[in-house]
Amino acid sequence: MLRRSALALALFSSISFAHAQLPQAVTQALQQNGIGQDEIGVLVLRGDAAVLEHRASLPMQPASTMKLVTTLVGLERLGPAFRGRTELRTTGQVEDGVLRGSLYLKGGADADLAGIDIDNMLRALRYEGIERIEGDLVLDRELFQPARTDVGLPPFDESPEAYYNVIPDALLVNKNMLQLDMRSTGSRLQLRMHPELERVAVTSEMMLVDANCAAWENGWQQPEVRREPDGRIKVVLRGTFPKNCNRSYGVNVLDRDDYVGRLVRQAWSDQGGVLSGRTITGATPLDARLLAAHVSRQLPELVRDTNKPSDNALARTLFLSLGSLQADPVAGSLALPAPGTGESTFARADAAVRGWLREKQIDDAGFVIDNGSGLSRIERISAQQMARLLQAGLRSPWAPEFQSSMPIGAVDGTMRRRLQGSPAAGRARLKTGSLRNVTALAGYVPDANGIPCVFVAMINSEQSGNGRGRAVLDLLVDWVARSGVPQAGSE
């Protein structure tokens, strides 16, 4: 009994001491990894009591932990039955198998929209007897304003073709990705591209070299897109590729008007249809009648697919949806346009997030949200603000959906290889964040008694890369998971 009392006193002393400053093991890890104590912000709460607080009021770059803001506000503002919606509409009439008028493809922030969905929507037209469209194909992205934020925007980093850099719009099909299948022998490289797009081909100027197939990306260069005089498009692969190597890689290199327009035309042609007009962009007339539609999965499924693998495109789409869509109070299933105010979609989304924060009595001073994904150099949030948000998440009607979207330590998502052997393994639910100079974790970590603690830690340091910041934060999670006083009768 005396031994247990002494242990309890020691743990209480440790927690009291830790509230004043970082645990010694963490300060040592910071020093060993060249990270200053002034480059980390931490707040750990057990209930409303601070277990550990260090520079918690300082706004910091959160990297992808910002997705927790977007997804929780999305669940609470749009509701769990929210779905994006894509429609095919027309003002024309059908006579003898001919649609005499333009076909409008109207985007509705449908995060699931894929080539197969376009196929199915077009098949619905064929079932109605339409064989020929004598009009233009009009691509409608007007739900988001401006409709194309990607045009003219400088690349975020040296890999603009990578999926994590995709900038969403209201009509994004297959996330604008081309899947390339590359198979080489000792002397030849065979290429295939999916999906097939009308008058688009992939070709190679890559040099085959003796190299490790596992390190094939070392010779990769950004592909070049060439538009031929006859309107054809060639995606030209450059750099080097190992001999006797098979790899598949997705790239975002085509302008999205080309991508969507040529995908629709290819799919319509494959079904035996003819489309005689141009591909243009524009708005769908209010009196256009519905021909076919596709709806996305419900929001909790998309939130899970946002947070578990840290999907930037999904997070950015949801953020913009907060500024352009609202829940359907009657059907409870489909997105409805938000009232227009003349403001940009970003401004309305920003206002929606800040309005939610203030409703929860969370001070938004110093808070900066850029695109809602964390893939930003200017987004800022303090550990204190994030912790208050996570507390609100525990009280939310959609707390189960929110918590189940977070990666589980040593189990899945971006945490599947972390916290192995820690008491936090299989128990902590934490959203990761990582940029060149940022390492962050935020979520819930049960302590030694199983009491969930709100956990937020962010490192903003040029020395945080190459696993250095991750090692510090994993040590801090482990410390929280071992904290707490054993209950009476426990060993």
Image (spheres, helix red, strand yellow):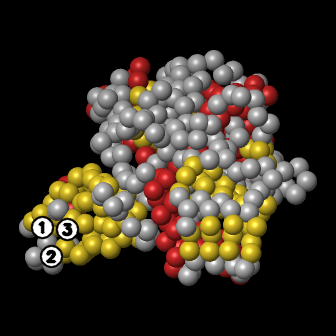
- Name the residue tied to disc 3: 213
Which mark is first along the chain, 3 or 1? 1
Q: Is residue 381 above or below residue 77?
A: above
Residue nearer the viewer, 374 or 254 = 254
The quarter of the displayed image where residue 294 is located = bottom right
Q: Determine contact: label 1, label 3, CB under 8 Å.
A: no
Q: CA distance from mark 2 to mark 1?
A: 8 Å
For label 3, the SS is: helix
* Residue at x 51% of width, y 79% of height: 270
Residue pushed farthest right? Answer: 330
* Residue at x 61% of width, y 55% of height: 138
Q: CA distance from mark 1 to mark 3?
A: 11 Å
Residue nearer the viewer, 38 or 140 = 140
- Name the residue tied to disc 2: 188
Q: Is residue 226 visible?
A: yes
Where residue 398 sits: x, y (%)? 77, 50
Which mark is first along the chain, 1 or 2? 2
| Pair 3/2: label in front | 2
Which mark is first along the chain, 2 or 3? 2
Where residue 147 sits: x, y (%)? 58, 41
* Residue at x 44% of width, y 30% of height: 377
Other-residue count near label 3 (Cα within 10 Å), few / some / many at <14 / 14–19 / ≥20: some
Q: Is residue 76 above or below residue 458?
A: below
Residue nearer the viewer, 171 or 38 = 171
- Name the residue tied to disc 1: 208
Which amino acid type is marked by label 1?
A: Leu
Tag count: 3
Q: Which mark is residue 313?
A: none
For label 1, the SS is: strand
Which amino acid type is marked by label 2?
A: Arg
Q: Determine contact: label 2, label 1, CB under 8 Å.
A: yes
